[in-house]
Image: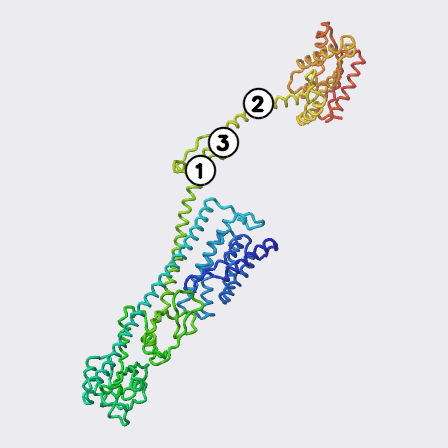
Amino acid sequence: MRVPALNIAHLKLATFLGLFGLVLNLYPIPLFANVQLILGNAAVVIVAILLGPWYALFTALFTATGLMLAWSSAHVYLVFLLEALWLGFARRRDFPILYASICYWLLLGLPLMGLYLWLITGMPAYHIPFTTIKQAFNGIFYTTLGELCVVALPSLWHLKDRLVNHTRRTMSSQLSYLFILITTISLLASSLVFNHYFMDKQQVLINQNLDDTGISLSHATETYISTNTRTIASVGKFISVSGLPFEQWQLVLDSVQGLTPSFTNMFIANQDGEIVAGSPLEKLHQVNQLPQKVNVQNRDYFIQAFIHHNTFVSPVFIGHGVNKDIIIAISAPIFKEGSNTAIGIVQGSLDLSYFSNIDNQNQHHETQSIILLDEKQNIVYASERLGLQPLAPFNYVTGSTEYHTRLKLMDINQQEADTPEFIYAHHQLKNGWHLYVLEPFVPLLTLAQNQYTKTIILLLLSMVGAIIIAKAISRLTTTPLALLAQHFSQNKDGSFNDEKFEHELLDSSTPQEIYSLYESLEANQQTLLSHQLELEDKVKQRTIDLEIANGKLKDMAERDSLTNLYNRRYTEKQFLKIQDLCERGQDTIAVVLLDLDFFKKVNDTYGHLAGDECLKVMAQVLSSHFKRDVDLLCRYGGEEFVLVLPMCNSLNVEEHLNQFRTRLAKQIITDPATQNSFSVTVSIGALIADASYNASLDVWLKQADENLYKAKDRGRNCVVCTHIIEPI
């Protein structure tokens, strides 16, 4: 794996975003329980999109450190550094970042976090799904936020040497993906807000429910205690005021016991603390049969009532005597008639099973529990499901540093547990007792977990729907554009389509911008076509003119301007082709050199115009006498002319040349200036040989020139030919 060269500008950007993300992650946004929204990791997403995996890994070191400081959990380095690499490599492969994030959390993030929480932290199994799901939810949220930041900040579009797509995506796919991003962030944000308000409302309802239950149970408890306290006080007062004799105290207790079943037993003790009356009688008999006589003089309820003259409600304690029950004693003094001198007390042992009835009568008793404490924080009553014993001190821990909630939280069985056990409401009774109403915290966590799970499922379903809708919408926009582009583009032959564009997608429902574009393109095409036709006409005319000019240039390059015969350069070049062709066909070539006799005298006598006219006549007679297409007629220079006669009959050449000589001599030439008439003769030297004689025209002309001089020496106006049959 190749690590790219370090780019200082990119490193600075990655460092800045990393520090920015670190600061954001130091202060995660609390939502509910231990659900916190982290936004700093969006910086990692931005770097992964712009710069790739290695810079994203560098940035993730900063942001993960911020989470480490906030959460004190080392798993952040494993989970979020791997996420940075995953997103960076996905970006390199042109894989959409949002889809890459979803794949990461489904395939790697959730399993890794689940294993870490289970094996390392020892978190309860029921709480692991909620913790992992809310982190996946958070990951998708900050990924979408980071990608939208890249889209929304134009300065990031033109970052030098940023990662670019290897393949160009269609406009339809780009619009679809942008639509999905916006839909996702909208769904996530609205889900967060909805879940926050939903859970907040649930907490308010739970608090209100617990408070209502606490108030109701407190009132029932206070009523129960105060009613029975008044009962005991009334018995003591009745005996004191009525002056009943000692023998009738037992009857009074039996009557009260029969009317008030709230007491397990009642008794009257005299001033010495000895029990002198009791109800029910069975328990009194059992007390009297004890080997050691029971004396209550040292008991709090005796002291408070007899000495301090108070109606007293005791804390919970274990009774003495026959039954070692856990009881609450209520006592009141009995005074001597007409005085304030106490002569005894009346005491009742309150039936604690009534609190169980109060607990069971609570309409939410299936989920709620109660704990009743006396003023010494000892347990008077606790719901059976809590497993707490009466008289035991109530040990508990309230609050939680890791869970953000509006609820009051309490742990009683696992005081160092990661997850709080109960939500509670506390009420203090008028007698100094305390009532706690408890409800398990886990069901609320389960509710929150279900909410976030449903949100994730809804998000995935919405993304599928968004993809379908986005593609349909993008097709409505891009298909007309594609059709317009196809219609107004050049055909394979380079021409344009001049037919009017008609398609069912281009109607009154077409967006105004697209229809305006169509009208503009249509107008521009018509203008372009008219210009094209005009240019084609101009090009056609100029091509004709150019061809004519090229023909003239060619003639000027190949022909003599005066005689219109081929010039020397063309003849020398063309002879090579003629000689090669005739050599392959084993044909004969005649090369003839002609020179006008006394041409200088014509110029001197008649002038140069007459000389030019003489040359023209010479050319005309040559052209009319040598008519074959293969014959090459050339003005070689001055008054000299050259004939190249390929594929000729060697026996007839000399005769044909003499006929020309005679014909020229008879030709009358008129001076255009003076209208004087004259005639000229010509001397001819010729070489007739096989084409293989020589490939050089100069060799042929040398022999023909020798024959020309022979003709001059013989008196001019004659033909001298040389026949060479075999090549030299």
Count of numbered circles in the view: 3
Task: Write the residue at 52% across / 32% down.
Answer: 494
| Quadrant of res 456 | bottom left
Q: Is residue 608 left or right of residue 200?
A: right
Mark 3–mark 1 Cα distance, whole angstroms, equals: 15 Å
Lower sequence index among marks 3 and 1:
1
Q: Nearer the viewer, residue 440 or 697?
A: 440
Circles 3 and 1 in contact, beta carbons < 8 Å: no
> Is residue 666 in sight in this rendering?
no
Circles 2 and 1 in contact, beta carbons < 8 Å: no
Q: Nearer the viewer, residue 307 or 202?
A: 307
Mark 2–mark 1 Cα distance, whole angstroms, equals: 40 Å
Q: Quadrant of the C terminus?
A: top right
Mark 2–mark 3 Cα distance, whole angstroms, equals: 25 Å
Going by the picture, which residue comes out furthest to the bottom?
A: 291
Q: From the image, tell me which residue sits under label 1.
A: 514
Picture layout, residue 567 above or below residue 495: above
Percent across and percent down for residue 355 are 28, 76
